[in-house]
Amino acid sequence: MKIIDKLAWLEIQNGKILVAKTRGREVFYIPGGKREIGETDEQALLREIEEELSVHLIREDLKHYGVFQAQAHGHAEGIIVKMTCYQGAYFGSVQASSEIEAIAWVNHKDKEMVSFVDRIIFDDLNAKGLLA
């Protein structure tokens, strides 16, 4: 079994969560990405979010939310994505940048438009009353 280790930023406003779609992909993802060699979770997440959404996360405000695993979307059976999730404040204006084609604010009923691991996260957020 191969594990893809990723990080995600959970930004929720008015019961909706921010998701992004990478060029050439068919589903939306919770923003984030993979760490580069030697990066901590925080360093990787700050870098990825700035690259993808043109905003700056506030390092001191980042809070670990949880870790979720599922079959990696678009990969061979048995390849698992492990998503370590954080919440935290930011400054700047969210906009698609770099490889991001589109962003959207969605709620729980829209979970079919996101990756498999994100659907599990959506269910968790909904069960806790954070996602409408």
Image (spheres, rainbow, N blue to C red):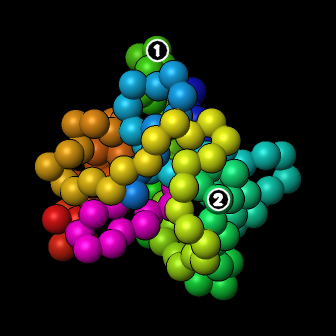
Q: Which residue is mark 2?
A: 54
Q: Where the C terminus falls, by quadrant?
A: bottom left
Where does residue 117 sit, x and y in percent of width and height?
37, 42
Where does residue 110 sit, x and y in percent of width and height?
20, 45
- Furthest-top residue in this view: 76
Magenta span: helix, strand or loop, mainly?
strand
Q: Which residue is mark 1?
A: 76
Label 1 Cα neighbours within 10 Å, binned few <14 / some 14-19 / many ≥20: few
Distance from Cα at disc 1 to Cα at disc 2: 32 Å
- Select label 1 or label 2 by which is in front: 2
Q: Nearer the viewer, residue 19 or 66?
A: 19
- Furthest-right residue in this view: 38
**Residue under the image location 27 percent in, 63 percent down:** 16
Classify 49 as above or below 62: above
**Residue under the image location 29 percent in, 48 percent down:** 120
Is residue 118 visible in this depiction of the protein? yes
Where does residue 36 sit, x and y in percent of width and height?
79, 46
User: Given the image, on which type of amino acid does mark 1 rest?
Assistant: Ala
Q: Secondary structure at mark 1?
A: loop
**Residue under the image location 28 percent in, 45 percent down:** 119
Q: Which residues are magenta?
A: 8-17
Q: Secondary structure at mark 2?
A: loop
Left or right: 42 with respect to 1? right
Q: Nearer the viewer, residue 31 or 82?
A: 31
**Residue under the image location 61 percent in, 77 percent down:** 91
Where does residue 30 sit, x and y in percent of width and height?
44, 50
